[in-house]
Image: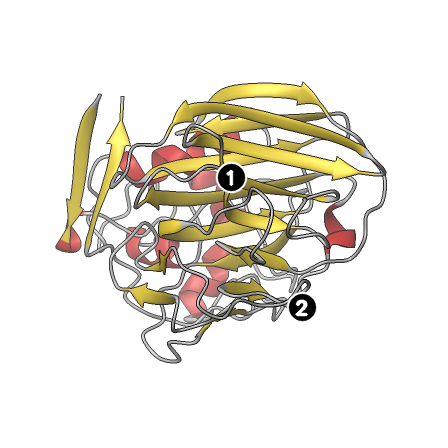
Amino acid sequence: MKAVVFAGRAALCVAVLAAASASAALEGWWRFAEPEAADASEDLSGNGRHVFLATNAVLKASDGPGGGSAWFDGRSDAKPHPGEFAYAFAPDFDESSVTGAFTVAAWVCPGAAGAYSPIAVCSSDPDGWTDGFGLFLGEGGEAAAFRSCGGAEAFVSGGALAPGVWRHVAARFDGRALSLWVDGRRAGEAAAPSGGCEPAPLALGTIVGRGPVQPFSGGVADVRVWSSALADSEIASAYRQFVGGALDPEGDDDGDGMPNGWEAFYGLDPRDAADAGADPDGDGVSNLAECRLGRSPRAGVRRGAGLLRSVTATAF
């Protein structure tokens, strides 16, 4: 195992596979990269499900996978009542859209190992997680995921997350099984319940203040939720995109006519020429044509540098 450090223009902010699969519907995408509005983070999926941050408990940072990150102090200063959220949440996120199948992914850099610390959780019961789904730190500080519905539940854990090291974690539910992924590799799987659940917002690092759940301490970056089960190769590629070799932003590694930097900023893969003909926003104009027209191929995404300043990740 070795540490890989990206700095300056040596590496690109390459987004997770928002357009890699025609069946993958991106329900929310939060990079925490925008410099303004420190108390909010834009939903780059175009669905308007912005994450609001309690600035006394979580701050944005300019460094991290995706070009930014949210850092949690591990305290619950607000001491909220049940149903309220102390740290960061997307109030317009609707869990009912991801009950049949989903994939949730995030880069995580724990500040300290905390048992049952939420990373990204969607549940109407933030104390007991009796419904919904989410990523969290397990009893020993390892990566973990859960899926609960109608009194049935499934938990999967595996892959210790060392404090101070960025790791990529993902959970996938295909309607029958819940699987956990760490750095692009399957870490565990279990049968999981299907069916509808209570509507609930998506919360990051949040606790209500009672029960075994502890507040999350550390960094979270590039959180994404899809209302479909991504393929094994898509989850693995989502990890590899951040730890691959450096790319020249002005170059065109896959020769598809779109510069590396443009592809990276808009969530495309600079190493896959097949995305030139894709149309992720469904406007009838291909990515290549959008690029040549100087337009965004994805509704709601702003132009910007989109380059990593500095991030340490783990590679094998």
Residue 103: x %, y % from top left: 61, 40
* Residue identified by numbered label 2: 92
Residue 207: x %, y % from top left: 55, 55
Residue 184: numbered disc = none
Cα distance in 3D space between marks 1 and 2: 25 Å
Residue 205: x %, y % from top left: 48, 54
Q: Residue at x 18, y 45 (%)?
A: 6
- Marked residue nearer the N-terminal end (1 or 2): 2
Q: Residue at x 39, y 73 (%)?
A: 55
Graded by Cα atoms within 10 Å as few (under 14), some (14 to 19) or many (20 or more), the crowding at tag 2 reads some
* Residue identified by numbered label 1: 116
Q: Are marks 1 and 2 in contact (CB under 8 Å)?
A: no
Q: Residue at x 78, y 53 (%)?
A: 96
Residue 2: x %, y % from top left: 18, 25
Question: Of circles 1 and 2, which is in front?
Answer: 1
The residue sitting at the bottom extreme is 37
Location of the N terminus by quadrant is: top left
Q: Residue at x 49, y 70 (%)?
A: 78
